[in-house]
Amino acid sequence: MELSLGTLGSAAAALALGLSLYALVAGTLGAARRDARLQTSARLTAVAVFLATTTAVLVMQAALLTDDFSVKYVAEQSRIDAPTWVKVVTLWAALEGSVLLWAWLLTGYTAALAMTTPNHALRAWALAVMQGVQVFFLGVVAIVANPFVVLANPPFDGPGANPLLQNHWMMAVHPVLMYLGFVGLTVPFAFAMAALITRRPGTEWMQLTRRWTLAGWGFLTAAIIAGGWWSYEVLGWGGYWAWDPVENVSFMPWLTATAFIHSVQVQERRRMLKSWNVLLIVLTFSLTILGTFLTRSGVVSSVHAFGDGPVGPVFLAFFVLVALFSLGLVAWRWDQVRDRAELDAAVSREGAFLLVNVLFLALTFTVLIGTLFPLIVEAVDGARVTVGAPFFDVVSLPMWMLVLLLMGIGPLLPWRKAETQSLTRNLAWMLAGGGLAAGAALAFGLREVYPVLTIGLAGWNLTSLALLLAGAVVPRARLTGRSLASASVRYAFEQRRKVGSMIVHFGVVVVALGIAGSSGYRTDVQLRLPYGERVAFNQYELQALAPFSERTAGRVSVGVEVAVFQAGRQVDLLRPHINAFGTSSMTVPTAAVRYTPGHDLYLSIAGAVDPRADAVIIRVIQSPLITWIWIGAVILALGTVWTLVPARSLGPATAPAAAGQRARA
Amino acid sequence: MRRLAPAVWAAAAAWLLLGQVAAQDVVLDPRVFEIGRELRCPTCVAESVSESNASIAREMRQIIQEQLDAGRTRSEILGFFQDRYGDWILLEPPRRGLLLLVWLLPVAAALGAGAGLVALMRRWRAAGEQVAEVAPEDLARVRAALAATGDGGTADAGDRPTPRTPAPRP
Amino acid sequence: MRRVALVVAIVGGLSALFVFGLLRGAPDRNVPSNLLGRPVPTFVLPVYERYLADFGPRLSLADHVGRPMVINFWASWCGPCYVEAPHLEAAHRRYGDEVLFIGVQTQERDARVAGRAFIERFDFTFPNVIDDDSRVSIAYGLFGVPETFFVHADGTLDHKHVGPVDARLLTERVEALRR
């Protein structure tokens, strides 16, 4: 057998699979028998698996970058004259490569876990579970959908990746973030399984994995919003979320994971909601695997779906295995996980978190029903229906409003029982803040229900955050004799979790406002722009100047230059165009966007650009506040990072002068 | 058009007589895109008529504009396409028969979850307020111990659990 | 035991649903026509030059109700249309006395040149018309091309086939129309 990249890659994948199987067996035996040697062997093997998978990834990249068309995946997905960055991201552009990326990230996480987790009763079993998941993904890479298959007659060139995936640099970022999120959330799942197996359903498994969980959640959040921004820039209809089935299946684990990261705090504090937490993480992981199944099997119709053939049944089998194993484990250990809880009052932090769980689960169920409904109807009736964005918007919006409401009042509620006086006072402030905001919106002439409600809830939430901050910082400043600013900074550095969560909630408010503005008050028209004439649109005037065409590596662009005038002065020059890639007949209209903090002006070519015509048809969209979604996402990410970095003390608590005063007093 | 020779112009006029008007050369107002968001593009994979750039989507937007100009309402226009394509073309399933389920199930789930939550909270609250049963000998021992420490424990001290004070604000 | 049964029931139900999904193949490529059993929409469309002598500048479907019809929608950019074209022509030559075959070029604009090339390549002797603005294909509820409609003599739709037709299917369906 000659040593080509294809055989090298297949060998690396097979090696990784074999090592992973060994680690699974050794790890399970070592955990069951508490055999330290076997456990250590499994841990070290985890690192070896990571190295083997890395080799496979590097081999694939080498094949892509050197245009080695004897490798099946390269022949199917790549092109000689594609730009280098496109060749690099082609690794995850299609099914086989995306599974390889997932497997690689998974082996990386497992190796890191194996080497950094302190020796603990849960560690061995958790690693064994991770290896089990790994065996599946590596098995798909090595056996079911092997990208390294060597072609006997390699073609001279390939068709290139899907044009939609070459159109924007976000292709390099979004899938990686998404997989980092999914893989990251596998860690708490593995530890939860370990906790059930070892009959330690307490808080250990959550505390050990807290940072992993938050990081995974953070990546998933970033991935979903990044995907929205990518849709916005690439797809030409000025939207960012279509409730497409594949979008939904990435959203559902996020919903349950968000409920989970809130609910675990109740278990940390009050030893309550154990069963909820275990079920939430099981649900999160199961939904992740369900998501990969639906995306890669072609069972639901989606613009994102890719994959066919034998992969579908394999992923279904794994989903059934995961669901039966995890739920079976929960059922088996139910007596230990069951809540024998005592609740002092419904109006308390526990009560609020419980409500969060219920709300997010209801949302998850709604999205699941909507996504699967066409399939269910077809199975029952044979009839064909579609469940699209209008349904999801109508049914979920009320629940989102409740979430925003809860997000405001929750952090202000004390544990155990809310004391009426302070609760009423806080509520009064927040109602005032919310009412003021909503009133201002109405005064501005806004009349749509949900945007006004969102603005009111933004006021409600901002007041809540101010109350939280003031309630924490003012006493600190008084006690330590420092200034408010200094006390705030110290508070921020010392109370990472609290301040981090405040930043994240603030980010959510910003995102909510962005969504309210861009959905409620969007202007969407199609205009005919004769060359050289100014056409009015809202507060702008648009003038199509001239068509243009450019050729860069692997693509041809044809577009129109449009000058944008405001109050008579030219403020921008936008160049919406249509890209054609390589040999594909598929053209991708690429929008040109003018970003301002208040709104976006979005131009996209509708139809063809005919150089002989005297006008061009442009779709013009103005979306108010849409940039706030992306800004809010950045704030969310920063807040998550803030929470993850360990707290440190900033020197003595009391200011030296004050300490001196008190000593004398 | 100005540049065309008369013969070609005649041919073009004949063409025009046959009712061929370029759909793209028409301005579309915002209502078209609103209605288009509720219709599915037939040749695309899961895109709405407002989102898609496919030729049939563009033609459908043109049809919607013409029908709006003719004074038809939103439901009439949706019904026009539903008549030709069936329920499948609507992105919001019609509310009848089996399809009602997709609307009812989430509402039922939310209500059921809410009711379950209330029941759960009630049960937990009751558990919280339950007085633990204590054997009389143990009660006597506690009282004796309290008296011994000079706490001035009253006869009531052992009967009821002390009321819980709210935990200090975090 | 009850808990285990619940778990198995939920997972089992979902699995059954997904197995059904896997077995039934690609979704939304074969939605049944809403016109079945109903009169097909009539149209008046311009014909290609080849047929001017026999059919005049425009073909009106309403004039031809009374004969069974096979209406085939195609486009010059559609690959499977090239595959089915010879079978259509052969079927026309066999059944053309009783059954009227009509080809409709749709879902492309200003494509006369390409359309003419398509017709000449397969030597279509049955009339082909031009649906330049795709209104007729929308009226017929087309999901793509090619699609073929088998119409009774009374003008109602007997069967719609999505995708390319082959000789066997054509024979089967046309025989059904003749009865």
Image (tube, coloured by chain):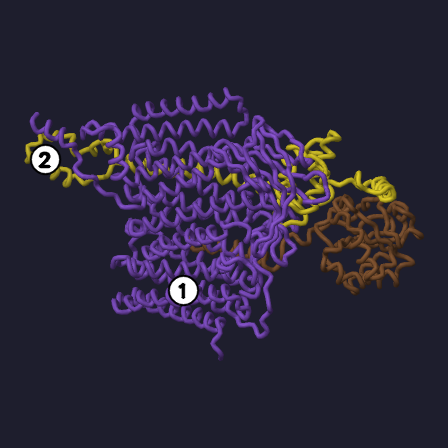
Instruction: Give the colour in which the image draws chain B.
Output: yellow
Looking at the rendered structure, the kind of residue marked 2 is Leu
Question: Which quadrant holds residue A17?
Answer: bottom left
Q: Nearer the viewer, residue A444 or B39?
A: A444
The answer to the question of whether label 2 and label 1 lie on touching residues, with beta carbons closer than 8 A, is no
> In the figure, what tint was chain C given?
brown
Check disc 1 and report the residue beneath it: A54
User: Residue B76: percent from the left, percent from the top?
Assistant: 71, 34
- Which residue occupies the extreme top position in the image? A443
- B68 relative to A118, above or below: above
The chain holding disc 1 is A
Q: Position of residue A212 (x, y in %)?
A: 34, 51
Q: Amino acid at mark 1?
A: Thr
Q: Which residue in the structure is indicated by mark 2?
A: B146
Q: Which mark is residue A374?
A: none
Residue A191 falls in image quadrant: bottom left
Q: Nearer the viewer, residue A565 or A313?
A: A565
Q: Colour of chain A?
A: purple
Q: Secondary structure at mark 2?
A: helix
Up/down of A648 relative to A443, above or below:
below
Q: Chain of mark 2?
A: B
Q: Residue at position x 28%, y 57% from top? A: A117
Image coords of residue C52 (percent x, y): 91, 51
Residue C6 seen anywhere in this rendered image of the structure: no
